[in-house]
Amino acid sequence: MTALFRQLPSVDKLLKMPQGEQLIVEFGHTAMVNVCRKLIEQGREAIKSTQQLPAYFADISRTFNEIQRQLVKQSQVQIQAVHNLTGTVLHTNLGRAVWAESAQQAALHAMRGNVALEYDLDEGRRSHRDNYISDLILALTGAEAACVVNNNAAAVLLTLATFAKGKEVIISRGELIEIGGAFRIPDIMAQAGCTLVEVGTTNRTHLKDYRNAITENTAFLMKVHSSNYQICGFTSAVEDAELVALGKEFNIPVISDLGSGALVDLSQYHLPKEPTVQEKLGQGVDLISFSGDKLLGGVQAGIIVGKKALIDQLQAHPLKRVLRCDKAILAGLEATLRLYLQPEKLAEKLPTLRLLTRSLDELQADAEQVKVRLEKRLNSAYFLQLETSSAQIGSGSQPMARIPSVAVTIAETSGKLTALLARFKTLTTPIIARVEQNKIWLDMRSVADINALLKTLEEL
Ligand SMILES: *Cc1c(COP(=O)(O)O)cnc(C)c1O
């Protein structure tokens, strides 16, 4: 064993050899030393546990190859692209909405240099970073003003903390939702320092329940769009307009956490209807918050729209400074919202809507191409089929609603499917699929770039 230990090079020796000096020029001294130390340590461990030298210590050129490989690898970004074949278009674990081309460009420009983020070019003086978004929101929805924060969870927190700290917020029991990732309405209320006043029952809440709960300490009547679950059967909820009328009677604002927050009526695309921001404003809701990367199809952000006097107070709260968005995000959001100014082109230019509205014929054609590629590369043990599939919007929108789709399914009887799934994940751009009924489902509805997918499949 001592003989083996003696065969391990020293860090010093590696650094002084010409190949070592070359790697220092390329990657710097610190990284080179760290990788050499790690490799030698691994060598020691291997000798102890297996009484053998790892293969890369067999000769010095292999050692330097391994050092170089590790140096290259450590500079490669690990948040890497994947192909989404899950059939869930807005998949939170896969980064939700794919950005529109114009949003990517806008963000890139913003990050490459300085931008007039808080600077009014016409007036030559300081302005506010949310102004660009606020102006667009006004044009698109008629809302008086907007406030932009990091995400919709932050939007809800900011709203409650600004107006309801030490006060009561009345909400229906049927809307006390958890949306995953530890976002629960009661917890957010507690964080904001307000008291939750639950009214009604899980399945039925009436206007009189809200009315009876109002005290002089009530800050808000709150509605939460329980988009990620449905209660069926004997149910009743209070319409926003009724709640607004009640709020007016007592001079209490009504706020709505809309979640996905569509800016267009999805039913015109034959998709399941989601309430729109404009409808809520039309019903007189005072403040509405929604996500930027769900149905809006843009960037991770939370947008609060509504009465200017209220928005001004949100903007002035110290938490707003904590939760504000950076220039690249605001540029991406602005570019995304600009697409909504040309609604006839939206389904073409906004990836989320493009994917949701692709015809079954298009999906079928894609599926056929995928099947042909797979047939060439998988042996006859695998049984491939085109099947109708049901995709979903994702991110809590309409969990019951299924969108028709087409999938390539892969069946295999001797238990090799797990290995194939694992193989899919090792491709240059990993493929993330769905497993159902003992088959792999490659759902075409959520594929953002079919040509890139076909290219990846050639690696199999
Ligand atoms: C998704 C969602 C949120 C959280 O939004 P993020 O942008 O993910 O922070 C809050 N409320 C509802 C109703 C939601 O659907």
Image (cartoon, rainbow, N blue to C red):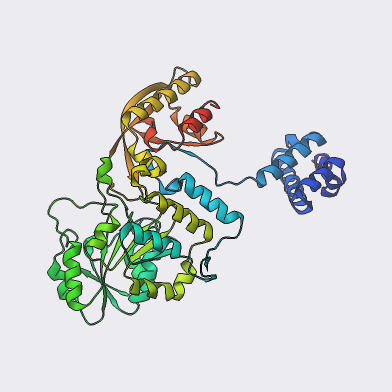
Residue shown at 51%/66% (left/top)? 122
Give above or below for 225 relative to 249.
above
Front position in the image: 304 or 349: 349
Residue 45 vs residue 269, the one in the foreground:
269
Ligand 1 placement by image quarter = bottom left
Residue 90 in the image, given as x and y percentages of width and height: 39, 46
In the displayed structure, would residue 410 be above or below residue 180?
A: above
Of all residues, the one furthest to the front in this rendering is 122
> Does residue 9 appear anywhere in the picture?
no
- Height in image: 163 above or below 109? below
Place of residue 370 in the rendered image (x, y in percent of width and height, measured from the top left) = 44, 25
Image position, residue 444 (x, y; %): 39, 33
Residue at 34%, 64% (x, y): give it: 305
Front position in the image: 177 or 340: 340
- Left or right: residue 373 versus residue 347 is right
The residue lying at 15 percent from left, 60 percent from top is: 204
Picture quarter with the N terminus: top right
